Amino acid sequence: CRAAPSQPTMSCAEPCRAKPCHAVPSLAGGKRDNDLILPINSSLSVTLHQDQLKTTTTAAASRDFTEDRLWLNGEEADVGHPRLQACLREVRRLARKRRGGSAEDAAPLSLSYKIHIATENNFPTAAGLASSAAGYACLVSALARLYGVEGELSEVARRGSGSACRSMFGGFVQWQRGERPDGRDSLAHQVAPETHWPELRVLVLVVSGEKKQVGSTAGMQTSVATSPLLKHRAEAVVPERLALMIRHIRERDFEGFGQLAMQDSNQFHATCLDTFPPIFYLNDLSRHIIALAHRFNAHHGRTKV
Amino acid sequence: CRAAPSQPTMSCAEPCRAKPCHAVPSLAGGKRDNDLILPINSSLSVTLHQDQLKTTTTAAASRDFTEDRLWLNGEEADVGHPRLQACLREVRRLARKRRGGSAEDAAPLSLSYKIHIATENNFPTAAGLASSAAGYACLVSALARLYGVEGELSEVARRGSGSACRSMFGGFVQWQRGERPDGRDSLAHQVAPETHWPELRVLVLVVSGEKKQVGSTAGMQTSVATSPLLKHRAEAVVPERLALMIRHIRERDFEGFGQLAMQDSNQFHATCLDTFPPIFYLNDLSRHIIALAHRFNAHHGRTKV
């Protein structure tokens, strides 16, 4: 239920089904600002349907809660995480702005109430399936409903996890790098809706359900600091590829789309390997699947996968 | 035995122990000319001691041989391989030049005699251990002895396998890219002899004895044609790293040497991954060993491996 005047003491957001974002690989990039989470290049992803992978998040605020608390997949987790706190702070700021600066106590749901958040993924967490993109997109949506905030929220989601800004939309979504140091123009927008290319299917093959040895955030920071190839990729390769990828999507050109998605995925993993110490997100099974895709396409004489 | 006037009908070169070249990773690069085997960047390697890895090659010429023949690790192989033929042709050309253009029949060993070559590696062939570098270096040395040719032979060895030119020398060896289209300045020279850094040890860990799925030559051709990162690496990264690596070697600075060797090995493998279709020379075991090396060094607080 939404926060309502009749229920000021206990408000809960509807479970908000997430839009986990499976990265079309050209998304991959590093960050130019790790606090504001500003990327070194623009990026693009496809948001999956919630019937398959999804995050479900419930948020509640109450005058009876004595502290903020967070449960992740049924286990209590650290609610003090700076990125979670940044999202909470930003949503409350927007709520305050929306309420026209009226005294908090006069508002239907006090912004000073402590909050309880429960979030759950129906897929492996931190295993390369964009769980933090889905998680933060879902968290920001749930908080926005709780506090009655509407409008552009991708900037807030970005503060939780960069890729979360893209997961605020369905279909094909671009995250504009932006130019401003304060990140106000580093936003996501939809390139094409989910109805645009209904024949497209995303197969998610889980080659390991284990938590990644190096998380995305730490990994990207190290890559930006140590990989000469990443710098070149962000400056000289991605801008051209991104424009090309958008054209392939608009024209529903699977041959072009598939070839470029493969190339760019490989190049992202190449920059991980060029990071020092190197980061490995592919294992032997991933590599067998990649080889299988190439053999399958070669057998059919065109890009079918 | 060397070809000698008293034995004109049957001449055999002494078994020539090879100098297999284990690549200090900055060697890795592509080719700008695949026939002449001209690289897109200069490179550097360490030649291993023949007490460990070695190739042994025997070459014999006789008027009684009816055809050229080749045995590789005990099995007859294709003697018509263009690169093997190129080496044979070049050594004979040098022999002819040395004999001052005298009629062939007057020479101690006729250059028109058919040739038999037997070559053997005491380590896995085509498995990433530079077997073709050792093999062609050894072949060219054996042929040179057979025909009585001396002097600069790295250019000839390069025609067999690029990396073979470095294996003509011991110690630390640089392969100068060169500028000439005919490749006459694309030669190897010794940066420091094997006595320069006796404490240095090369551990060769064989993670797979299987033949590589994509051979070095085909792989490098595809990389040059498809990898945007390789081009950047060759032009913008390698020249600086090579100069730095030579300084580390001269100063016996293992910290600098080891860090740069690791970084450059990773970057070479990154360009393999950026190749399309991607090439994988690392497997899960390689990656575990890399991670182990980093943990070992971290534990000791300095670069020990």
Image: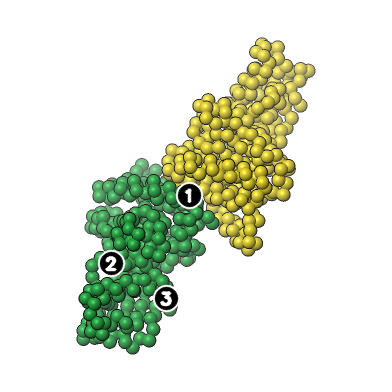
Chain colours: A yellow, B green
- Residue beneath disc 3: B80
Label 3 near label 1: C-beta < 8 Å?
A: no
Q: Are marks 2 and 3 on the same chain?
A: yes
Q: Residue A132's spot in the image, x, y percent? A: 60, 37
Chain at numbered mark 1: B
Chain at numbered mark 2: B
Tell me if mark 2 has few (under 14), some (14-19) or many (20+) residues whose alpha carbon lies within 10 angstroms of its own.
many
Q: Residue A289's spot in the image, x, y percent? A: 59, 56
Mark 1 secondary-structure assignment:
helix
- Front residue (pair B90, B3): B90
Mark 2 secondary-structure assignment:
loop
Asked whether residue B70 appears in the rendered view, the answer is yes
Q: Which tag, 1 or 2, sits closer to the chain's start?
A: 2
| Residue at screen point 35% across, 80% down | B116
Asked whether residue B52 appears in the rendered view, the answer is no
- Spatial CA span between label 2 and label 3: 21 Å
| Residue at screen point 21% across, 76% down | B100
Chain at numbered mark 3: B
- Residue beneath disc 1: B228
- Residue beneath disc 2: B153
Q: Residue A278's spot in the image, x, y percent? A: 45, 46
The amino acid beneath tag 1 is Pro
Q: Which tag, 2 or 3, sits closer to the chain's start?
A: 3
Q: Which mark is residue B48?
A: none
Asked if residue A178 is positioned above or below residue B137 in the image, the reply reads: above
The amino acid beneath tag 3 is Gly
Mark 3 secondary-structure assignment:
loop
- Front residue (pair B193, A208): B193
Q: Is residue B17 left or right of residue A105?
A: left
The quadrant of the image that shows the C terminus of chain A is: bottom right
